[in-house]
Amino acid sequence: QVYLVESGGGLVQPGGSLRLSCRPNINIFSFNLMGWYRQAPGKERELVANIANTGTTAYADSVKGRFTISRDNAKNTLYLQMNSLKPEDTAVYYCNVERPIYGRSWGLGTQVTVSS
């Protein structure tokens, strides 16, 4: 069983920054893919960014140039640095990981609210 502990959400003004963290209970090298998804009220969950164990990253068009996904193997942690936040970034953000054979696991989510 994989458990993912997310942190870093909160209330921020437009133009501000937040950094989300996701720490799994098993070694980060177990995952072939790690990522962040988000779900706004009344909308479907969508991919924000992901990073493969090769280091290859992918981003939703709506966050390119503003968000950066990274992983710190020494700290066994996945990050999402979010800059120039907009009200439309308001959502619950979920950490997601994939393991060969075992499939995907989700965190419980952390709320990000961008408002003045």
Image (cartoon, rainbow, N blue to C red):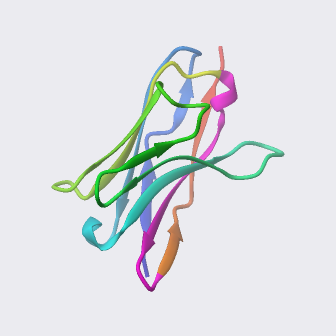
Specify whether residue 94 is painted magenta: yes
Picture coordinates of residue 48 (x, y %)?
A: 56, 44
Q: In this image, 73 relative to 51: left or right?
A: left
Residue at figure coordinates x 55%, y 22% from the top left? 85
Picture coordinates of residue 70 (x, y %)?
A: 33, 44
Residue at figure coordinates x 51%, y 71% from the top left? 105
Picture coordinates of residue 57 (x, y %)?
A: 40, 47
Specify whether residue 96 is painted magenta: yes
Task: Using the image, determine if residue 82 lies above or below residue 49.
Answer: above
Q: Which residues are magenta?
A: 87-102
Q: Report the quarter where the N terminus lies.
A: bottom left
Task: Using the image, determine if residue 62 lies above or below residue 53.
Answer: above
Residue furthest toward the right? 42
Residue at figure coordinates x 59%, y 34% from the top left? 61
Residue 28's quadrant in the figure? bottom left
In the image shown, does 13 or 57 lie closer to the viewer?
57
Residue 98's quadrant in the figure? bottom left
Task: Using the image, determine if residue 101 lies above or below residue 42.
Answer: below
Q: Report the quarter where the C terminus lies.
A: top right
Task: Using the image, determine if residue 106 lies above or below residue 11.
Answer: below
Picture coordinates of residue 103 (x, y %)?
A: 50, 78
Q: In this image, 44 relative to 107: left or right?
A: right
Residue at figure coordinates x 43%, y 64% from the top left? 4
Residue furthest toward the bottom? 101
Tally of marks: 0
